[in-house]
Amino acid sequence: MPSFTTLLLESDEAGYKRATQPQFLAAAAAGKVPKEVLGQWLANERLFLHAYIKGVGRLLSSLQLPHLSDSAQAPDPVTEFLDLSVEGLANARPEEKFLTETASKYGININLPAHGDDWVAEDDKIEGLRRFEALFGSITWNDSTFLPWLECAVLFYATDKIYTDAWKWARSQVESGSDASRDLDDGILRQLLIPRWSNPEWDVFVERLGKLIDDSVEQEIKLHQEGIKARLSARAREQWKLVLTAEETFWPKFQAV
């Protein structure tokens, strides 16, 4: 029987394809994204990392950790979610540093237009960034008795899973032996970004978070019978669709020439 997260992945295959196989990444794999376009996207990516960091902060402040300890048992799901969240947080800051250093090295501007005191107007952000800022900014504990942290876990799982699969797809589109020296972005995407963000190490983190969700749902089903699965699935799918839309609209509307 398919796992809970597998059913999420299969719940909107057309939407998943749009989110993970955009024209922007097809052009990136072909070396046809100009540095100016890449810089604008990286500017949004950098602010996405800020939203992610703040989202983890909101999550950590709302986690209801167990009051009692039992060293004889494996960590409870909430504590395990805490560990994964801290790990994700620790990964975000080095990525921002990598972006700024890469931009500096290749002479790319990754700042959106500033207004007043270091303020970026909403209209200058890509739609997907605005959606992610709203998602991460509204993180809260569900009032349900059953897995009140489910929506939070699905948000972070979906974000990382879709993003990782998108870059793996981009890597699969790069022609073997192709010369990146003549790429419109000086080879940044094909030599640096695509290999870095399609690295199998990212899969390990995503799979651990997915397994936590799957195991926790299965445990709830054992405790409360099969009927609880539909309720959990409805909550998860609603969050999944929100992330799919945010991911799809995070990629620039781009047509290579």
Image (spheres, helix red, strand yellow):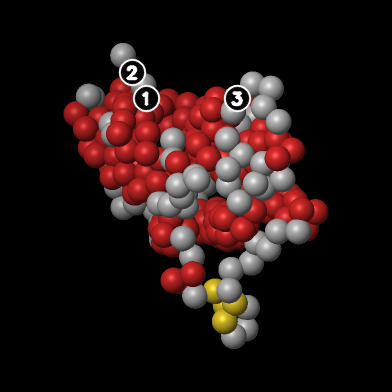
The CA distance from mark 1 to mark 2 is 6 Å
- The CA span between labels 1 and 3 is 30 Å
Within 10 Å of disc 3 (Cα), the crowding (few <14, some 14-19, many 20+) is: few
Please identify, in this view, whether the residue under mark 1 or under mark 3 is nearer the observer.
3
> Residue sitting at 31 percent across and 22 percent down?
222
Q: Are marks 1 and 3 in contact (CB under 8 Å)?
A: no
Residue 6 numbered tag: 1
Q: Earlier in the sequence, mark 1 or mark 3?
A: 1
Residue 4 vertical position relative to residue 245 in the rendered view, above or below: above
> Looking at the image, which residue is at 50% across and 36% down?
26
Residue farthest along the right direction in this orientation: 105
Q: Is disc 2 placed on a helix, strand or loop?
A: loop
**Residue on which disc 2 sits:** 2
| Residue type, label 2 | Pro
Where is residue 211? Give x, y as percent.
47, 26
Q: Quadrant of residue 186?
A: top right
Q: Amino acid at mark 1?
A: Thr
The outermost residue toward the top is 1
Q: What SS does tag 3 mark?
A: loop
Give the amino acid type for the residue marked by disc 3 in the picture: Glu
Badge 2 local density, few (<14 within 10 Å), some, or many (20+)? few
Please tell me which residue lies in front, 95 or 104.
104
- Tell me where residue 1 appears, x and y as whole percent: 31, 14
Q: Are marks 1 and 2 in contact (CB under 8 Å)?
A: yes
Which residue matches tag 3? 175
Q: Is residue 18 visible?
A: yes
- Earlier in the chain: of badge 3 and badge 2, it is 2
